[in-house]
Image: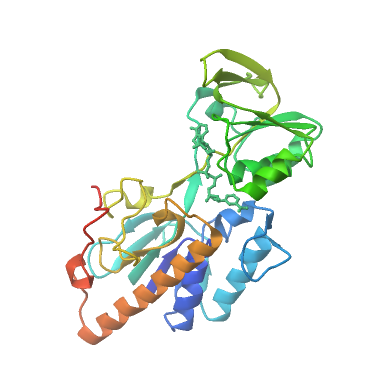
């Protein structure tokens, strides 16, 4: 049996792997069957990760994380965790291949998934003009008129990137004020190919086999109109990816994994969480990396206590108890 399995290979998972590997825990990182690196693999330039004053491409940054983790002895596995058994001293991670890995401790760092608008045309035309990833699909929209839905940093980043290909990019936002940071707003405002459509919700995506337009509803007076275009990029935020632990770990009212105060300790001893999966607020690569550090250190202390006691800690109270605020919901 291993000492530690880390599920997830974004900045949180791979930073946890670097720390755990340096502590000789020889962690196994269940990275995903698709890609190592998490969400930053779908990003272009990362300008705000400290240590890279000239910026760095997301995939290049994550390759460096991976190389650093492997250098210290972390094992990266290209597979998905499909089921978890977390009760008791032996944690079992069932993989997509059918194989089962066992460990004394688990760090859960599965990040977050793109949020959907929740309208019928979105599912139906997904892959036929509806996308959640500009870097993956932008190329297909050369000289076309397309839209980005959302008003945060992701929407500004996607819209700005898409102007490399599209002839025009509408940014459709439900308010008249952006949530995005000032620098990202300015970049979008100054781009002549971007046009803002304020106070508007997308209530339908039109088209049979491919996107032909969107139906917009005014958030001011409820009036509706159709806007012809051939592509819709949805960038309205993310939700924590917690489906593997529903009913197994307590969640907060935000849907993130509940942890004990500033630690990474979940309600199950020996199970730790890190990154976007526990963070409804900051959600930056650098905060996820910091969170991965916390989880690795907590796991290291837990495993050291096991070694000393010769037996596992069996209740959350024995590892510090719960704070009085932000109680978990069932
Ligand atoms: P976000 O900051 O939560 O913004 C989501 C945007 O989508 C908001 O403008 C929100 O509108 C809108 N929205 C949410 N649900 C909607 C719905 N159902 N229909 C229509 N619009 C909806 O998410 P994000 O932009 O993905 O950013 C997440 C985090 O990552 C942030 O902390 C951000 O700073 C960070 N990030 C940073 C960078 C960078 O620094 N380069 C790039 C990308 C992301 P309201 O404003 O009305 O709520």
In the image, 104 versus 94, the foreground residue is 104
Query: Is residue 1 at least partly visible in the picture?
Result: no
In the displayed structure, 139 sits above or below 242; it is: above
Picture quarter containing residue 210?
Answer: top right
In the image, 107 versus 52, the foreground residue is 52
| 87 left or right, relative to 10 | left
Location of the N terminus by quadrant is bottom left
Q: Which residue sits at x=34%, y=65%?
A: 262
In the displayed structure, 200 sits above or below 163; it is: above
Q: Quadrant of ligand 1?
A: top right
Picture quarter containing residue 148?
Answer: top right
In the displayed structure, 136 sits above or below 33; it is: above
On the image, the x and y values in percent for residue 211 come to 66, 24
Q: Which residue sits at x=76%, y=31%?
A: 168
On the image, the x and y values in percent for residue 90 come to 27, 69
Q: Which residue sits at x=76%, y=40%?
A: 190
Q: Which residue sits at x=54%, y=81%?
A: 72
């Amino acid at each position: 049996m291993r000492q530690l399995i880390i599920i997830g290979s974004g900045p949180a998972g791979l930073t946890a792997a670097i720390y755990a590997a340096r502590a000789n825990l020889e962690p196994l990182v269940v990275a995903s069957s698709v890609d190592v690196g998490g969400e930053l693999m779908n990003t272009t330039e990362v300008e705000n990760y400290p240590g890279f004053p000239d910026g760095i491409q997301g995939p290049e940054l994550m390759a460096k994380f991976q190389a650093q983790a492997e250098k210290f002895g972390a094992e990266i596995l290209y597979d998905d965790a499909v089921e978890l058994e977390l009760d008791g001293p032996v944690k079992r991670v069932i993989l997509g291949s059918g194989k089962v890995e066992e460990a004394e401790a688990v760090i859960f760092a599965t990040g977050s998934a793109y949020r959907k608008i929740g309208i019928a045309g979105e599912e139906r035309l997904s892959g036929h003009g509806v996308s959640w990833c500009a870097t993956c699909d932008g190329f297909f929209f050369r000289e076309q008129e397309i839209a980005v839905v959302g008003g945060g940093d992701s929407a500004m980043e996607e819209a700005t990137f898409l102007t490399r290909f599209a002839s025009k990019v509408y940014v459709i936002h439900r308010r008249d004020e952006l949530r995005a940071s000032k620098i990202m707003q300015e970049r979008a405002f100054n781009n002549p190919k971007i046009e803002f459509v304020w106070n508007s919700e997308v209530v339908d995506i039109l088209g049979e086999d491919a996107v032909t337009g969107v139906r917009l509803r005014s958030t001011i007076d409820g009036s509706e109109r159709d806007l012809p275009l051939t592509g819709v990029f949805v960038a309205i935020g993310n939700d924590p990816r917690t489906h593997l632990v529903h009913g197994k770990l307590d969640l907060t009212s935000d849907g993130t994994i509940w942890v004990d105060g500033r630690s990474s300790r979940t309600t199950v001893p020996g199970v730790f969480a890190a990154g976007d999966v526990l963070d409804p607020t900051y959600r930056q690569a650098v905060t996820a990396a910091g969170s991965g550090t916390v989880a690795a250190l907590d796991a290291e202390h837990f495993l050291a206590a096991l070694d000393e006691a010769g037996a596992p800690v069996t209740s959350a109270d024995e590892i510090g108890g719960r704070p009085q605020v932000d109680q978990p919901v069932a």
